[in-house]
Image: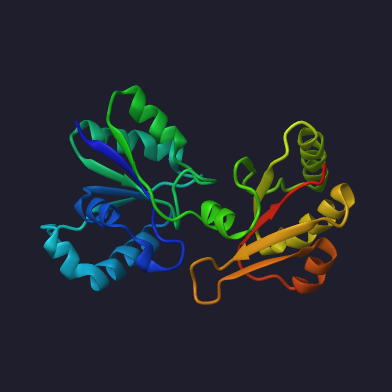
Amino acid sequence: MGILSIVATPIGNLEDISLRALRALFSADVIACEDTRRAGSLLSELKKRYEPILTGLSISLDKPPTFIRYDDRTEQQSTPVLLEHLASGATVVLISDAGTPLLNDPGYILVREVRRKGIPVNSIPGASALLTALTVAGLPTDKFMYLGYPPEKQAHRVRLLESLKECNRRIEETYVFYVSPHKLTGMLEDLSAVLGNIEITFARELTKKFEEVWTGTLDEAKIRYADPKGEFVLLFRIAS
């Protein structure tokens, strides 16, 4: 019987890779990933940078892993394939394009089915845009709600924000969204309509050369990010 490892990979700075993650990636028989070319490039770059460390860990670099695509479109068909590999004794690693797998990325179906079959699963922690943004935003972190990407339809976004406003009357917490650049303007408008000109924090390009963590009002954000670029982590509180 094999083992499934959930491995976090860097969200920008490759120096954030851990020794455990390196060992898992370069010892894997199979790597399940959203983009096989991107995963291959990651391993190639990690090998180039950390080959002496890998050699010191007695990890053989002669046998590359098999890459299997595992994303929203393929998880139903790829899950049985990965289960077969695990049943045959293979070591399988699941990664996302960047950061911690399963956080707004596919994977829970695979983990659920693997655990149902009694196959071991372990998680090798590491980079996460969610946690990185929370720790630099200057907002309370004792209670927070992560909501992934906002709904596509405006009516659904407004309904969600109204629900948060109601919930906040009972439990005050920090709210966290991921927002794509082409959805940012609409999200800011909806926030203004439901919550008023509240203060928000944006984190983008985290761990990269041009990392930015900005705090201001919604009106200020609309001006500053009139032409948004990059993926945003949006954090805010709702006044009681």
Picture residue at 81% right of the left edge, 61% below the top: 218
Q: Of 209 and 88, which appears nearest the observer?
A: 209
Give the residue displayed 44% in from the left and 40% down from the top.
107
| The N terminus: image quadrant | top left
Rendering coords of residue 221 (x, y %): 78, 67
Residue at 68% across / 54% down in the picture?
235
Residue lying furthest bottom: 209
- For the C terminus, the image quarter is top right
* Residue 74, horizontal then vertical, whole percent: 45, 43
The residue positioned 23% from the left and 69% from the top of the image is 50
Task: Locate residue 153, reporting x and y percent.
Answer: 77, 46
Residue 111 located left or right of residue 72: left
- Image quadrant of residue 161? top right
**Quadrant in the picture for residue 45:** bottom left
Residue 163, compared with residue 26, is above or below; it is above
| Depth check, front residue: 137 or 229 | 137
Residue 91 image point, x, y percent: 22, 42
- In-image side of 239 versus 128 (left or right): right
Q: How is the image coloured?
A: rainbow
- 151 or 70: which is nearer to us? 151
